[in-house]
Image (spheres, rainbow, N blue to C red):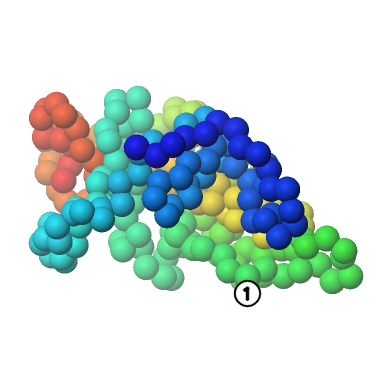
Amino acid sequence: MPTALSMFKSNTTFQDGWLQAYDTRTIAVQGNLVITMPNMDFIPAFHHFEEENIQARADGCFGAIDCFQWPQAYDHIFCNSTCIPRKEAFPSPHPLHWAWFTPTQEDFKPIPGNSFPVGTLTTDKVEGLDSLRKLAEKQVQDCRANRQGKNDAVVSRVLSLRHGISRLKMHPLTFRDLLMFVTDAQRLCLEIHSFMNWILLAQPCITAGDRTAVTFFNHFSRPPIVPHSLPL
């Protein structure tokens, strides 16, 4: 169990300034690992498989059984989380492949003549992320038209996604903030897409008892009736 600290003393010399008070809310040390958490007041015990046996896994590879790579847990409140699409199902040039794009420094275009390290994404990357917005808006518009204005809960996510993409287009950001906006836009897009998948694919399959295979992320659930009632 790591030693979790809710507060820590900031570095006293410039040379030791690798970690500052605003870099993390909680810090824990476990062996030679330093673990930080930006928004929680505790850090769970980190299990990093040093004593695990290498064995054959379900994916056909050899390695430690990594519980953090398991499917998401199922909850009726967030039922659409079972319909998160898999990355492998949407390779380029499908617009949804941008949901797993990670910007690099090469994608960062600094503002010339500015004394602050701010900039924007390159135009092609912004257009790629904007294709996520267009895809999400079309899905929601088609669904609302066919279902007579229902599913208003997802509309707020579309508005948030539109705002986030607008910030990436128009507002200079530091590279760290830019990464946060990109990640948040990707999260919103996947939430919208999974919600539409739940409404249009998963629910009809459950109602009809259809076991058609779909490319969802899937889930674990304790009650056996839950996975048996959902599409494979």
- Look at the picture and state if 60 lies above or below 27: below
Q: Total marks drawn?
A: 1
- Look at the picture and state if 109 lies above or below 194: below
Describe residue 85's horizontal placement relative to residue 135 as left or right: left
Q: Split into 4 quadrants, where in the image is the N terminus?
A: top left
Q: Can residue 155 be seen in this view?
A: no
Q: What element carries label 1?
A: helix
Describe residue 97's horizontal placement relative to residue 202 as left or right: right
Residue 225, position as x, y percentages in the image? 11, 28
Identify which residue is drawn at 46% across, 57% down: 99
The residue lying toward the viewer, choosing from 194 and 178, is 178
Residue 203, position as x, y percentages in the image? 25, 34
Query: For mark 1, what is the residue?
Result: 106
Describe residue 10's horizontal placement relative to residue 50 as left or right: right
Find the residue positioned furthest to the front: 12
The residue lying toward the viewer, choosing from 186 and 178, is 178
Q: Quadrant of residue 158?
A: top right
The residue lying toward the viewer, choosing from 86 and 45, is 45
